[in-house]
Image: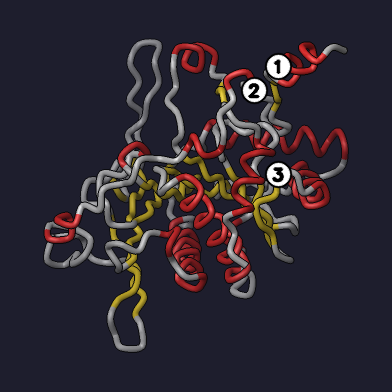
Amino acid sequence: MTTESKTKSKNISELRQDIVTGDWVVIATGRAKRPEDFIQSKREAKENDIDSCVFCNPEETGQEKDVLIYRTADKNWSLRVFPNKYPAFSRGKVPCSLEEGPYFAMSGTGYHEVVVTRDHYNQIALMEKMEIAEIFDAYQERYLDLMNKKTVNYISVFHNHGNEAGASIVHPHSQIMGIPVVSPYLKLELEGAEKYYRHSRHCVYCVMSEYESQAQKRVVFENDKFIAFCPFASRAAFEVWVMPKKHSPYYERITDKDKPELAEVFQRTMSSIYNSLGDPAYNFYIHTSPCDGKDYPHFHWHIEILPHTSTWAGFELQTGIEISTIQPEAAAKHLRKQIKT
C-alpha cells in the first residue's frame, strides 16, 4: 500500500451500529475534528439572573409547595423538589381517550416536578461528590413515590444545562416526569436487550461494560462499582454512558452504599466534560426499566450524557442517522486527560 493509500484509508468514515437498538451512526473521520475544536465559547456568567431567579427563593417567587426538601445541619435547605409551575402534564387526573377520525390520542396526565439545588452558580460539573450523591438520593426518593401513582407507567429523570440543551432557567435543576406511556426509545432498548439475551444468554449492557473495562479504549473513569465510557456507536461527540458494573434493571433499587460510588464516577465524568469542552450545554437522563408492573430482567439501567457539540441537518433529519466528527476512542482519551486524581 502506498503512502497516499494509507493516508486515504485513515480518512474513511465508519458506520457503527448500536449493539442494543440496531441504530446506525456515522463516525465521519473524513471530517474529523481535533478534541480542542469542540471547546465552546465561554458561557456568560449572567450575574444579574440571580436577582430575578425563581429557584433561589422558591417561596417568594410563588413556586408550589415542596414534595421533598433536604436540609443542612444549620437548617438551611440544600435541595428541594416541587411541582413544576408550568407542567407538561396535568397532575393526578385519569387519562381519557381523545380519538379523532383515524387518529388516537389521550389526555396528557401525569406528574412534572423540579429538583433544585441551592447554589445558583454551583452546577453539577463543579459539585463535590456528596452533593451529587444527594441529587441521586432525591431522584430515587421521588421515583419511589411516583411509581405507585395510578396514572404512572414510566418515569423520566433528566437534566438540561445551557440554552442549547433546553434549559430556560440558569439555576441548576433537574426534572422528573411521571407519565402513562413508555418512551419509544426505551422500548427499543428493552426489545434489543431481550433479543440479545435470548441469543447469547447474557445481558448486553453487562457485556459492554465488561468489554470496555478490559479494553480501556473508551473508558473515561471507573471504580469498583460503576464505569463511564464513550459508547462504541456514539451518537454525538463526547457522548458518555455511566452504568453499574453489577447487573441491575432498576435505578430505584440503588443502595445507599452504592450512591457515593456512582457520584464519584459521575462527578469525575462531568468535570472532565466541563474542563475539556469549556462548559458546554448538555443533557443527561436516566434510562431505567418502566414502572408498569411488568418485569424487565434483561435490562440494565444507565445514565446517558449528551454534550451539545453540533446541530442536526438534512441528512440526520431525513435518515435519523447521526454524524459524529470525532471517534469515541479519541474523545475518551481526551476526557481521561482531564480527570484529576
Structural crowding at the residue carrying mark 1, measured as other residues with C-alpha within 10 Å and reported as few (<14), some (14–19) or many (≥20): few
Q: Secondary structure beneath disc 3? A: loop
Spatial separation of the CA atoms under disc 3 and disc 2: 17 Å
Tell me, yes or no, whether the two marked residues, 1 and 2, touch with CB atoms within 8 Å.
Answer: yes
Q: In which quarter of the image is residue 77?
A: bottom left
Judge by depth and name the residue closer to the eye, 218 or 66.
Answer: 218
Q: Secondary structure beneath disc 1? A: loop
Judge whether 236 appears above or below 322 on screen: below
Residue tagged 2: 29
Which is more N-terminal, label 3 or label 1? 1
Give the label on residue 12, or none. 1
Judge by depth and name the residue closer to the eye, 311 or 34.
Answer: 34
Structural crowding at the residue carrying mark 2, measured as other residues with C-alpha within 10 Å and reported as few (<14), some (14–19) or many (≥20): some
Q: Which of marks 1 and 3 is in front?
A: 1
Image point 70% across, 56% down: which residue? 248
- Amino acid beneath label 1: Ile
Which is more N-terminal, label 2 or label 1? 1
Residue tagged 3: 218
